Image (cartoon, rainbow, N blue to C red):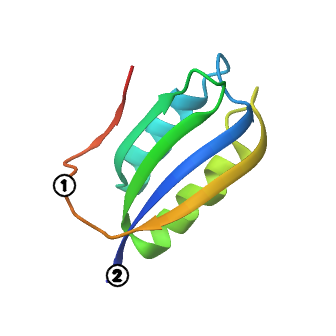
């Protein structure tokens, strides 16, 4: 079993109105990632993802590509202390 990690992400590019949050939620459920994703008023998407280190890396790789209609330009990744507070992954509005 790999170590648990938590990452705070800010995703820039064409990432709103293209199914990005839905695809992110589906992939998180598949990988067993916990946390949330939401649109920001400045056009970016923000997410907190937590779980097994190797699965979180796979999630970041997926987010770096995005949904089929997305055009991800930048993913800012901030390491945070794992807290284990999330029970599932959800979309915030």
Residue closest to the far front? 42
Report which quarter residue 85 is drawn in.
Answer: bottom left
Element under label 2? Answer: loop
Q: Position of residue 64 (x, y in %)?
A: 70, 51
Residue 36 shown left or right of residue 42 in the figure = left
- For marks 2 and 1 on the same chain, the one whose residue lies earlier in the sequence: 2
- Foreground residue among 15 and 32: 15
Q: Position of residue 21 (x, y in %)?
A: 53, 30
Question: Who's the residue at 34% across and 55% down the image?
Answer: 32
Above or below 43: residue 61:
below
Name the residue tied to disc 2. 3
Residue 77 shown left or right of residue 52 in the figure = right
- Foreground residue among 48 and 27: 48
Quadrant assignment for the N terminus: bottom left
Pointer 2 with pointer 1, Cβ within 8 A: no
Q: Position of residue 15 (x, y in %)?
A: 68, 29
Name the residue tied to disc 1. 85
Q: Position of residue 86 (x, y in %)?
A: 22, 50
Quadrant assignment for the C terminus: top left
Count of numbered marks? 2
Question: Who's the residue at 37% across and 54% down the image?
Answer: 33
Element under label 1? Answer: loop
Question: Who's the residue at 57% across and 20% down the image?
Answer: 41
């Amino acid at each position: 079993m790999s170590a648990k990690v938590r990452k705070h992400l800010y995703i820039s590019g064409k990432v709103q109105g293209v199914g990005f949050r839905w695809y992110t939620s589906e992939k998180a459920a598949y990988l067993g990632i916990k946390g949330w994703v939401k649109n920001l008023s400045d056009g970016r998407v923000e997410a907190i993802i937590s779980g097994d280190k190797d699965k979180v890396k796979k999630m970041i790789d997926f987010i770096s590509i995005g949904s089929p209609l997305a055009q991800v330009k930048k993913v800012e990744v901030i390491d945070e202390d794992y807290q284990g507070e999330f029970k599932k992954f959800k979309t915030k509005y």
